[in-house]
Image (spheres, rainbow, N blue to C red):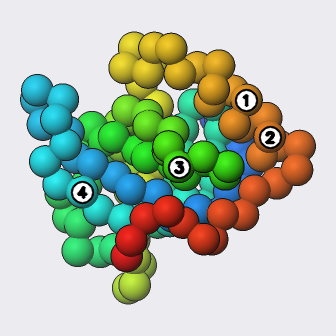
Amino acid sequence: MRNWNGEERRKCPRYSFSADVLLGLQDDSGKSRIQCHGHCENISLRGICIKISLKYREIKEKTKLQVKIPVCGTSQPLELIGQVTWRSQDEKSSRVGIQFLPNNNKGKEVFLFQFVESIKRKGYDYENSYMDK
């Protein structure tokens, strides 16, 4: 883990966001080979912080992931590709920071912007996820 000097480095503000998400580890061809459930803690236009089980050891820095985020009012999740930029853990769980990869998310920028703006305006707490546990 990198040393942090306390200086804010984020280029986009994060917003509290509580929702169950689905992660798919990407292989070299871009296909998901392992899927795992996580719980989102916050989101921005550039990335997302997700809490996951300790058992998913394959998810480490530089791992490429597909992130499926539930969207209220629709059965279709927002699907984005990202890369893990950091991982921390305690005795019970891990947290991962995932940076969205712009070149892999063409055509979804407007929807992501509208989604994050709606969270910014009114908050978002989607505990009743569409995903089975």
Q: What is the secondary structure assignment of the residue under circle 1?
A: helix
Mark 3 / mark 1, whichever is N-terminal: 3
Marks 2 and 4, Cα distance to the nearest angstrom? Answer: 27 Å
Q: What is the secondary structure assignment of the residue under circle 3?
A: loop
Q: Please provide percent x and percent y for residue 66.
A: 33, 40
Task: Tell whether label 1 touches label 2 (CB within 8 Å).
Answer: yes
The mark found on residue 3 in the picture is none
Given the image, on which type of amino acid does mark 4 rest?
A: Gln
Q: What is the secondary structure assignment of the residue under circle 4?
A: strand
Please name the residue that numbered disc 3 is placed on.
75
Please name the residue that numbered disc 1 is placed on.
114
The mark found on residue 35 in the picture is 4
Mark 4 / mark 1, whichever is N-terminal: 4
Front disc: 3 or 2: 3
Side of 73 where 99 appears, left or right: left
Given the image, on which type of amino acid does mark 1 rest?
A: Gln
> Hey, which quadrant is residue 117 in on the image?
top right
Q: Please provide percent x and percent y for residue 126.
A: 66, 63
Side of 85 where 116 appears, left or right: right
Marks 3 and 2, Cα distance to the nearest angstrom? Answer: 18 Å
